[in-house]
Amino acid sequence: SYELTQPPSVSVSPGQTASITCSGDQLGDKFACWYQQKPGQSPFLVIYQDTKRPSGIPERFSGSNSGNTATLTISGTQAMDEADYYCQAWDGSHVVFGGGTKLTVL
Amino acid sequence: EVQLLESGGGLVQPGGSLRLSCAASGFALSSYAMTWVRQAPGRGLEWVSTISGSGGSTYFSDSVKGRFTISRDTSKNTLYLQMNSLRAEDTAVYYCASTVAAAGTYYFDSWGQGTLVTVSS
């Protein structure tokens, strides 16, 4: 079965750039998306179709996808961005989520 | 405004059954694919099942295939998840999510608040 791998944790200082990776076999041939989830809240779509931002998502969130890796980049990271982030793709018959990355802003 | 409200969670014994509901408002279920995603306590997101916008296609994770059924009632604008032969490992918060099917992929643009299912004796 298809798998997506994320680092368990990423740390970033306020105002710096955070990059969260998501790896999967030939992931660049699929579309990747990203969700943010804060403690006690439901997940929230922040990037879809590799690079697109839903309405209301700040411009500091961006995405890319090439080869075997999709990347979520948060520029000028703010304290409010501290959350768990999940990548997700469709392998043709199954939805697949990455294991999630806890982003700590410190 | 899109709203999704899950209900039907609770405590059930191993081997038992439960039916979850997801009442949608702000859009018509008949025009949208819909998905159930679950999250075990302290764990990550796990896809459970998706039904296509036409309702004619359904997809299930290997972990629930043969035990769970996804359906919808467009007259009530409500999505369902019938869960049979429940196991302890099915314990999780279950979310319903409106699902965009585009460009050969699926993604989830709105989520409910979730309903907790606990399988325990």
Image: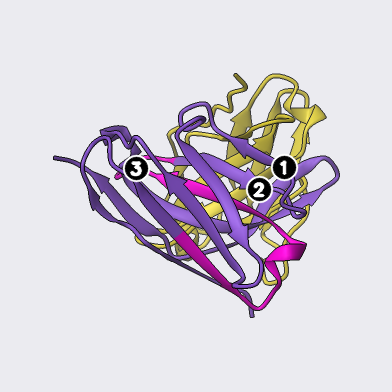
Chain colours: A yellow, B purple
Of marks 3 and 1, which one's residue comes earlier in the chain? 3
Q: Amino acid at mark 1?
A: Ser
Magenta run includes residue B25:
yes
- The magenta segment: B21-44
Q: Are marks 2 and 1 in contact (CB under 8 Å)?
A: yes
Rendered residue at 18%/41% (across/down):
B120
Rendered residue at 47%/39% (across/down):
B68
Rendered residue at 64%/32% (across/down):
A94
Are labels 3 and 1 assigned to the same chain? yes
Chain on which label 2 sits: B
**In which image quadrant can residue A28 be found?**
top right
Dot 3 falls on a residue whose secondary structure is loop
Q: Residues within 10 Å of mark 3 (few under 14, many from 20)?
A: some
- Residue position for label 2: B51
Q: Residues within 10 Å of mark 2 (few under 14, many from 20)?
A: many
Instruction: Classify the position of the C terminus of chain B by image quarter.
Output: top left
**Residue placed most toward the observer, A49 or B85:** B85
Q: Is residue A6 left or right of residue B58?
A: left
The reply to whether residue B88 is visible in this rendering is yes
Rendered residue at 77%/64% (across/down):
B31
Of marks 3 and 2, which one's residue comes earlier in the chain? 3
Q: Residues within 10 Å of mark 1 (few under 14, many from 20)?
A: few
Q: Amino acid at mark 3?
A: Ala
- Residue position for label 1: B57
Question: Percent position (x, y) of residue B88?
Answer: 26, 35
Are labels 2 and 1 assigned to the same chain? yes
Question: Percent position (x, y) of residue A105?
Answer: 43, 53
Relative to A93, is B116 above or below?
below
Dot 2 falls on a residue whose secondary structure is strand
Q: Amino acid at mark 2?
A: Ile
Chain on which label 3 sits: B
Relative to A29, is B18 above or below?
below
